[in-house]
Image (spheres, rainbow, N blue to C red):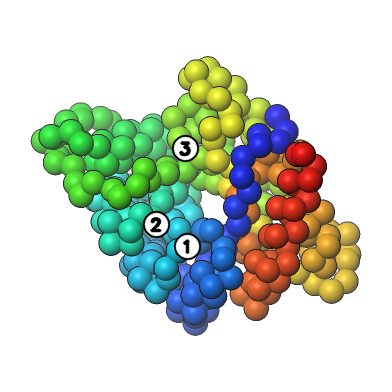
Amino acid sequence: MGDYGRPLTFGHFLSPELDADPLGTADAADRYGLDLIGIQDHPYQRRFLDTLTLMQAVLSATSRVHVFPAVASLPLRPPAVLAKAIASMDVLSGGRAELGLGAGAFWDAIEGYGGPRRTAAEARAALEEAIGVVRGLWSDRSELHLDGDHYRLDGAQPGPEPVHPIQLWLGVTGPRSLALTGGVADGWVASSPYVPPDRLVYANARLDAAAEHADRSPDELRRIYILDGRIEERSGGDFLRGPVEQWVDQLTDLALTHGIDTFLYAGPADHLSSFALEIAPAVRERAAHARA
């Protein structure tokens, strides 16, 4: 584990709250040259817009940034219909939709919205089945059949075909789910409050071992890190709470020591310009110098 040498990309973890002006923030992220926008998916939250609807609105309001659910709540998103929705967005946006997928959390809220309550083992098994469903719906096969424990397809017809190879990233933390990610997914999504830097060592080891077991190179796997912090004038020494230079130091270390290649800023939107125009280019430059 360490630096996997992947190009560094930067983005924003967009709030789906209507009062947060998500379309205005997305437009700013696009104009600032950010690469990616992730939108959390909690349909049961009263104040949240629907993530897939907001994704399409963001793609329509922007011209270059890629957009994905970070991450889609699988128990409330039937995977065949979800795959079709993401593929449709990809076609309509000219190839700018990606998919982040999660096994589910907040089970009381999911059950309250009509979704299934699953054990950890059931959620992981459903996630693995869903990956096959999604990939099948993005394929050029004539029809699909699946008789799984959680999902069933009987002559499902794929289409529309995505404009570009859509990336499938898993937002998981458990050891077996990390192994699933390393074996079959295109990337991993983690959040700094749930996976702080000291836990990245273990997570990366699980991802790398699973990738190698599947005859894949660990550097094939994109590693996306959601940065829950604040850009402040004064340094208090805390992780992701301090001035621009402190953020540059910490993100460069995450890239070169912990293999993170994609950083999503999740702080207040009024500091997005500092992240995009000051921190991101400085981290790229420092990492490039170290790699050289």
Is the residue marked by circle 3 packed among few (<14), some (14-19), or many (20+) residues within 10 Å? some
Q: Position of residue 289 (x, y in %)?
A: 79, 45
The residue lying at 44 percent from left, 59 percent from top is 67
Q: Quadrant of residue 140?
A: top left
Q: Label 1 sits on what residue type?
A: Val
Q: On the picture, is 110 further left or further right than 235?
A: left
Q: On the picture, is 102 further left or further right than 229?
A: left
The residue lying at 88 percent from left, 66 percent from top is 235
Label 3: element kind: loop
Q: Is there any visible trace of residue 88 in the rendered image?
A: yes
The answer to whether mark 2 and mark 1 are in CB contact below 8 A is yes
Residue 96: assigned label: 2
Q: Label 2 sits on what residue type?
A: Arg
Separation of residues labelled 2 and 1 (CA atoms): 7 Å
Q: Quadrant of residue 261?
A: top right
Separation of residues labelled 3 and 2 (CA atoms): 16 Å
Q: On the picture, is 163 further left or further right than 157?
A: right
Viewer-side residue, 88 vs 229? 88
Residue at which label 1 appears: 65
The residue lying at 51 percent from left, 69 percent from top is 30
Residue 186: assigned label: 3
Quarter of the image that includes the N terminus: top right
Q: Position of residue 92 (x, y in %)?
A: 28, 62
Label 1: element kind: loop
Q: Label 3 sits on what residue type?
A: Asp
Is the residue marked by circle 1 packed among few (<14), some (14-19), or many (20+) residues within 10 Å? many
Q: On the picture, is 15 further left or further right than 149?
A: right
